[in-house]
Every structure is written in structure tokens, then in C-alpha cells.
Amino acid sequence: MVTILKYWQYSLALILVGVIWHCQALLQEQQCPESCDCHYFRINWVTDCSNRALTTVPTTYEEGLSPNVYILNLNDNNITDINAFPDDIKLRSLLLAGNQLTTITRIAFFGLGYLLDLDLSNNKIVYIEPDTFVDSPGLISLKLQNNQLERIPGPFLITKSLLNLDISDCQINYLNQYFFTETPALNSMDLSGNPIEEIKPNVFNRIISLQVLKLNRCKLTTISINAFDKLEDLKTLELSNNYLKGPLDWTTIFAPLIRLESLDLRNSGISNLPDGIFEKNVWISSLILAENKLSNEDIVTVLGKNLRNLDLLDLYTCSINGISAKSFANATKLKTLILSGNTIPSADLTAVLSPLTNLQRLSMKNCSLTSLPANTFNKFTNLEELDLSMNPLNDAFIHLLNPLERLEHLDMSYSDLEYISNNTFSKMTSLKTLTLSGNSLKKLESGVFQNLTNLRVLKLSNCGLTGLNETVFQEKSIYAPLEELYLSGNPLIIAKKGSFLPTQLNHLKTLDLSSCNITYIPPNALHSFGNIVNLNLYGNQLTSDDEHSLEFLDNLPLLEKLDMSQNQLKWITPLLFRNNLNLKWLKLDDNPWQCGCNIADMWEWAYTVKGDLSLLVGSTLPEDDHARKNMKKSKALLCEHFTKKTPIKARKQKHLTDHLINHTWSYYVQESNCDSTRRLMPAKFIGTLTVVSESLSQQQQPVISSKFAPTWAWSSALILSLLLITIASILVKSTMKQLQKVPS
């Protein structure tokens, strides 16, 4: 018993020592370059030097780089060259995207023996030495997209460990037969966006472990019949947006891909598909043939008797005119079917769809359907999403929807509907999204949405509605907590007092009132809708003639996104947003703003108080008025400058004549004669210093850096260790007492 006790004590002591050592090691202060931000992410030390206008990489310990850095982020700088790293650095992830690199050599990565991930995308790289990563034996992921690689005569890279390679949009126009011979472990590769034009034999023969291959947008016209001979493990192949008009022997090309699960041939110029094209590809579950010119015979041929595991079939806009009743006879496992953009006779619909009893998503948008046969949806008890939009169906088909009790998303927009009865959706208690936009409903029956207890999104744009009160939502009824409501393009009538929306919708987070010809919103119109986060008022006739014009914003404390572009607003001040402390996105372009110190106030408020000038959409566009001439008017923030009346620097005044010109906000702020000290006073913008402090604390919560982490981190570790030691001591004493009572 004593031996067991000692063993238990030793074990506990070792555990405590391990915990203490782990806490100390985990929270130990690390070095950090002066211009960077450093912090722990979980247990890994991150050095973030992104967007610091750096021209060189901090690769020495004297520059503050920690030997234990796990992630080094140098994205979006002006780095043109990489110096060698220390031999003992533990760097796992190096991010160098968005720099000015042109050549990558082995010496730059000589010390990175632990490197796992490397991002060199969006540079100006023209050449990479093939043996660049020989000294990084664990490199797994390499991103090189959006560079300018020159023609490669031999092996592209020599690396036995690389699994994921992205060289999309690198201007590669030729793949020689040795290109991938020294990257045998590749599992996923993206070559999209390179003008390769032709896939020759043997190019992929050495990467037999490849499972994902993307060749989208490669201007391909020819694929060798032997191109994929060694890719038996390939599961995903993407060939969309190419020029594969042929003639091509598709059956032979696809035959080696016996494990293929996903094939994307969208918009590739295919006009015919041979019989038995997928004879060897029995495991295909996702097939995208959208935007090709196919026929009904092609569909029967494609599905045949082989694709019995098909889960998704996309035939969007394939110029199909009529579908045979036999088309889907063997595709009984199909869950997603997209037929949008084709001509489907209504009379054939029941026979065509009858085998697909497992369908969960059906899209028949713009299929020229004028009616639906009786019992069309009776077998679709599992259907969750249905799109019948842009078909001239009128009102007759509505009662056919009753069997769809599991439906979650229904789109009947632009279907020439004029009437919807209050029992249309009576059984659709699972419905989450309902789109009725573009129908001349004008008036909806009272209680039409009452049984939709799970409805979260309701789209009623361009329906000719003048309002929702008293016509749709009964005052004493309980409705689902709707989160998004879209009323764009309706001629809404807003009373001068009270709310123009039913108070039952007080859970709304997104409200779209764009292009509703609204001239005024009363101060208390949105009093019960304090949960709104996103408000769209684009394209109305709102004015700012007096201080109460936009007072309704005071009732929206959670507002994050506000669009008031293309209205008749002339004057604005940060004081209007004193209660919108969460505001992150404000679109104000295409209003007849008048230049004045209030414009400068808005600029300084966004930059200083909110800490993000891009909050003002259009503020970060080119500041030069000459550059603005070539931009779309609606994208820039402009104000009308009345010369000799609008405040502007004295040196400019003598050159001005008395007329009206337009300036960008940015240009006006630079040239204005407004008192910057007065503009920067937080009390002017928000009201009180207390509110400003709260605003800043909510928006600018600092990342824990190396300068602050050790103090609290070490204290926490010490407290935890002492607590564990105390508990252990109590347990030991308790055990000793128990043992003393036991006879030896």
C-alpha cells in the first residue's frame, strides 16, 4: 500500500511539474519586430507584419524575429527580395502574398526546415528555381496564384512532400512532359486561368495520387485521349469555361477516372455527348453540364444506366427543348436537379420528375412553364428547396404546393401571380425563405403568413404594395420572428406618425426599403425595430432639410450597415449617428451634397472616431478630380462646391470665380479651411466623452501583444499552478490519514 502511495505521489508531482512547465513555455514572452504586431493564437506565436509598407523581410533575431515564430504574416507589403532565415527558426507558415517579388531562389528558404505552408500569391514572380524548397522537407501547401511565370522547360519544382499546389492565373501557356515529374505527392492542384489550350499525353503521369484537378478558364480546345491515364484516384475534375467543341473522344478520355465523384463541364462549348460517355465513371455524384448546348437525346445518353449514384445534376441553360420521360429513370438517388433556363412542356413534367422521389432541391426557373399538372409535387415529400420563378404560371398552380410540408425555401417571384389565398402556405410550417417579388399582388389576404412559424426571410419587392399594416399581419396574431424583409420597389405610403410596419416584426435584422419613393420617415416610425442591423434606403427621395429629417436613426442602436445613396440629401453631420455606435458601412454617394465643414466633420469622424475611413463607401477612391472623370458617378462621394462661399484655403480663394463645381469629399477635405481641432472633438461627434470611450472600446479591442501578454499570462499560470499544488496537498494528506487507519 505504501508503494502504491509513493507511486501515486510521484505521478502527481510529475503531472504538476508538467503543467507548470507547459504554462511557462506556452506563455513565455517572445520577440517581436518593432513595426509588427505579435500575439499567441492558441499555443502558436504569430508575428503579423502585414500591410506595413515593408521593403525587406525581418529575417534576423536582431530585428526582433522570434526563433519560435509559428506564423509570419508579411502580406501586402513592398518586399522585392527574401533574405535567408536563421537555421534554427521553427517557422511553420509564411505568408508573402501581395508583394513585389520577382524571383524565388533556394537560398531564401535555406533555413526553413519546419515550413509547412507558403503563400506567394499576387506577386510578380517570373521564375522559381526548381530546387527552391529542397531544404523544406515538410512543405505541404504552396499558393502561387496570380503571378507571371515564364515558360518552364523542365520540372517545375523538386519537392517530395507537397500536397496542395495552386498555380492558377500564372500565365502558363505550356505544360511540358516533365513539369510534374518531381512533385509525386500532389493531392490537389489548381491550374485554372492559364492559357494552356492543350493537354498533351503523359503530363500528369507522375502525380498518380492526385485527387483534385482544376483546369477552369484555360482556353482548352484539345485534351489528349491519354491525358488522364494514370489518374485513377482522381475524385474531382473541373473543366469549366473552356472551348472543348471537339470532336473529342470523351468516353476514352474519362475511362481511366474510375473513382471520379465530381465533374464540372460548365460553359465548355460541348454540343453533343457520346453514348456511354460515363460507362466507367459509376461513382460520379455531382455532374455540372450547365451552359452547354445539349439536346434531350444527350440527357438520356448521359444518364443512361451508369450514373446510379448521381446526387446533383446541373443542366442550367443547356438549350434543351423538351425532356423525355425516360431521362431520369435511372437517377433515382438524385437530390439536386437544376433545369432552369430550358424549355420544359408542362404536360411532360409529371412523367419526367416521377422517378425522383428523393429530390431535396428542384430549380425550374425561367422554363416557359404556363401551368403545372395536377399532383406534380405529390411524390416530393423530401423537397426542401423549390424555384419556380420567372414562369408565367398565374394563380392556378398555387394549390399544388400543399403536399410540400418539408419545404424550407420557395421562390415564386415574377410568376404573374395576382392572388394568394390565406391557406396557400397553411401546411408549410418548415418554410424559412419565401420569395414573392415581382408579382402584382397589390393586396395580400390577412393572415396569409400566419402558419409559417419558421419563416425568417420574406421577399416582397416590386409587388405594388402600399403597406403591410392591417392587410397582412393581424394585430392579435403571433408570427414567426422574421429576420429579413425586402420591400424594394413598392409604392409604400408612410404615415406622418406611428410605425408603417407591423409591430409583430420587431425581430427584423435586415430591412430593404430601396426605391420605394419615400420622402420622409417619421422619428418614431422604427421605434419598435431596434434589432435592425442592415437598412437599405437606396433610391428614395429623402431630404435633410431640418434636424429631424433623419431622426429615425436614433431608434436603431444595433445598426451596422446603412445605404442612403441616390436620395436628395444635401447636408449631414456625425451627430446623426450618435446612437449608431456599431455602424461599420455607410453608403452616401449620388446625393446632391453641398461642400462644407460638415463634410470635413464626417471625414474626421470616420477616420478618427470610428477608426476606419472605408466606413464611408467611396472615400478610398482616387482623390484627384481628374482621375474621377473616368469613374462612374455613383461610385464616388462628391459634393457641390460653391466657390467664394464654401470654406476653402486662402491660397485657393483668389483663383476662384463665382460658380458651382464638384469635388470628391477627399479633395475638399484636403483643401478646406475648416478648423481641424474643432472637427476632432469627440464631444461634437458623439455627444459625450463617455459615449466616445464606450464606442472606441467596442470597436478597437486590442489584440494581446507580446508587450502585455507576459504579465497576465505568467500570473494566470502561477495561480493555476498554486491551485493545483494546493489541491494535490489536500489529497495527499487525506490519503495519508486513510492509510494510517489501515493496519500494516
Image (cartoon, helix red, strand yellow):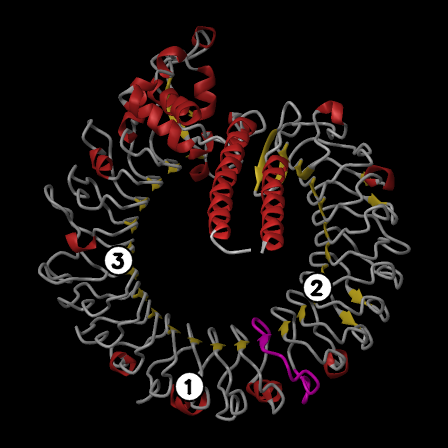
For residue 332, above or below residue 132:
below
Q: Are marks 1 and 2 in contact (CB under 8 Å)?
A: no
Nearer-the-camera pick, 549 or 254 = 254
Q: Amino acid at mark 1?
A: Pro
Q: Could you tell which of marks 1 and 3 lies nearer the N-terminus? A: 1
Q: Element at badge 2? A: loop
- Mark 3 = which residue? 482
Q: Is residue 620 magenta?
A: no
Magenta-tinted stretch: 273-292
- Name the disc covering residue 215, or none: 2
CA distance for labels 1 and 2:
36 Å
Q: Residues within 10 Å of mark 3 (few under 14, many from 20)?
A: many
Q: Element at badge 3? A: loop
Q: Element at badge 1? A: loop
Residue 471 image point, x, y percent:
12, 62
Nearer-the-camera pick, 616 or 331 = 331
